[in-house]
Amino acid sequence: MYEEDSTQIDYPIFLGKIYAHVFNKDSSIYWLDKAEKLIDKETLPSQLFQYYLWKGYAYEVNKNYDKALNNYFFSKKYINHIKKPYYLSFLYQRVLLLYSENQYKENVENWIYIYTKIKDSLADDRFTNSYHNALGKHYHYNQKALSALEQFNESIEYSKKLNDSSLLNNSYFHKGIIFAEYLKIQDSARYYYNLGLKICNCKKNKLFQATYKYNIARTYYYENDLELAKKWLLATLKDTISSRKLHIRNNVSKDLYSIYKQQNQKDSSFYYLELHKLYGDSLSVLEREKATTELQAKYDVSEKEKLNLILQNQIDKKQHEQRLLWIGSISLLMIGVGIGVLIYKNTKRKQRIAEQEKEIEIQKTEKLLKDQELAAIDAMIEGQEKERQRLANDLHDNLGSTLATVKLHFDHLKNNHNNPKIENIEELYGKTNDLLDEAYQKVRTIAHEKNSGVMANQGLLTAIKNLAKKVSSSDQIQVEVQDYGLDERLDNSLEISIFRMIQELITNCIKHAEANEIHVSLTNHESLLNIIIEDNGKGFDPKTIVDKDGMGLKTIEKRVEHLEGTFEIDSTPNQGTNIIINIPI
């Protein structure tokens, strides 16, 4: 499919994914780096998701877990563009197992909570099956045997229902380990290992075969049945022929050495002890580099000795010129001292100049920081002034005209209420009363818009959802709000600032982007509030932004900077807009 046009970004992403899956780490990173060079404004969100997902997995295979997690979280930004549950499942599973295997205790429970909510919302059997399998591994790694068995049993039921032999085999294998290592019930362990071997499509996969056989051998070893243990260990050796299985051969040799030693078979015991040492003793990359450095040093010393010998011969030949050499040396010494004094003075002068330049740079930096702080304050004041101006306009143009009409009606009633010639006096009273009701409703509307629900008891999230509901009341636009981990109220002033920014951005989506679908996502992750506002509007070039109004994009960006956060715009003409805001809370 990709060979027809290998210049497209999908081609190197695909190869990076394949090489990562077969643990060819260097080739995986090589192709994903090529993919990175092809990323531009035309790159689709689904392609960016795939790039970051497999870049994260490639780093995980390389045991660079921090970079792996960073790339996984980058891919999560584009998760709304992915429809296949397999990719969603792979992302959530890998992050959970990374947290679990590397003891990220402060993160893992929160991630399980998010993972569970996604599982419940999707209601997809394959996603649910992978969820139970991943959760079982998590409990297994943390030595919670009974909780792990419960999850693997759920996975087994779903695997049978879906005819998923891969996860079914994996669940049987882990159940075998739990019975062998934690519950110490070896016959049950062998039962599940043998079930795994029967349904495993791995007859040609020597690594799978060797792993299963080695684990079966260990069950007999735990029961002190040395003959059967030895039989299975020898069978394991037949399936361990490549370098990737070196660790298995090392363990098998160690166990065979122990068995033959207990059986007092010295020759065989000595043979497998030597094999164990052979597999265990290999120079690391650092040791090889050290050895190379030592050889180079010896070579340099040898060359220096040869050079000294040549110089000594030359001195011997020119002893009669010693006096002239002494005179020349003294002259050179005096010249050298003079040059040294000049160099010292020049160095001191340069140091003084460097210190002055450093002090000037510090002053420039302090001035820049003050200017930035003043700009942020100006932006806030400008926004507040804009809000006051808008409120004044509403009072003057909207409420003012209504009250002026009421005043005219009252003047007319005051001057003519006893005049019998005036007809429809009761109708005039009714119209005046209606105008007063209308003025009252306008005052309530202005007060509601001013408060917008943020300063009331319901909090930021409810206020945003009410705003979305209000905007979505027509059939022409749909606003969706999604939240993760935003269970507690924030500081009231922070909630007001965040609400005003989201309110203005939604208004921009409707007014300027002409969007009919808007997605607002709020995620609380490790004391950081992540806000993503995404629309399907006409998009724009972020470089062409001109800040004309008090609450324009530039002003919102300054407000975010004032809150010590980050503001990012991802937009392309005719392809919608993503705005990503991160604010510490």
Image (tube, grey):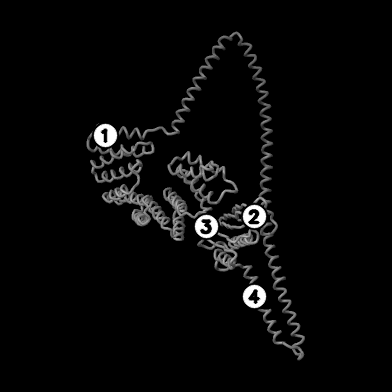
Q: Mark 2 = which residue?
A: 558
Marks 1 and 2 close (CB-CB < 8 Å): no
Name which of mark 3 and mark 4 comes first in the sequence. 4
The answer to whether residue 382 is above or below residue 229 is below
Q: Residue at x 39, y 38 (%)?
A: 244
Splitting the image into 4 quarters, where does residue 156 fall? bottom left
202 displayed left or right of 52: left
Mark 4 surroundings: few (<14), some (14-19) or many (≥20) residues within 10 A: few
Give the amino acid type for the residue marked by disc 3 in the picture. Asn
Q: Position of residue 23 (x, y in %)?
A: 43, 41
Quadrant of the snapshot with the C terminus: bottom right
Q: Mark 1 = which residue?
A: 269
Q: State the mark number for residue 441.
A: 4
- Residue 106 visible in image: no
Marks 2 and 4 close (CB-CB < 8 Å): no
Q: Residue at x 70, y 87 (%)?
A: 426
Q: Position of residue 11 (x, y in %)?
A: 51, 43
Splitting the image into 4 quarters, where does residue 342 fall? top right
Question: Disc 2 versus disc 4: distance between alpha carbons?
Answer: 36 Å
381 displayed left or right of 491: right
Q: Mark 3 = which residue?
A: 524
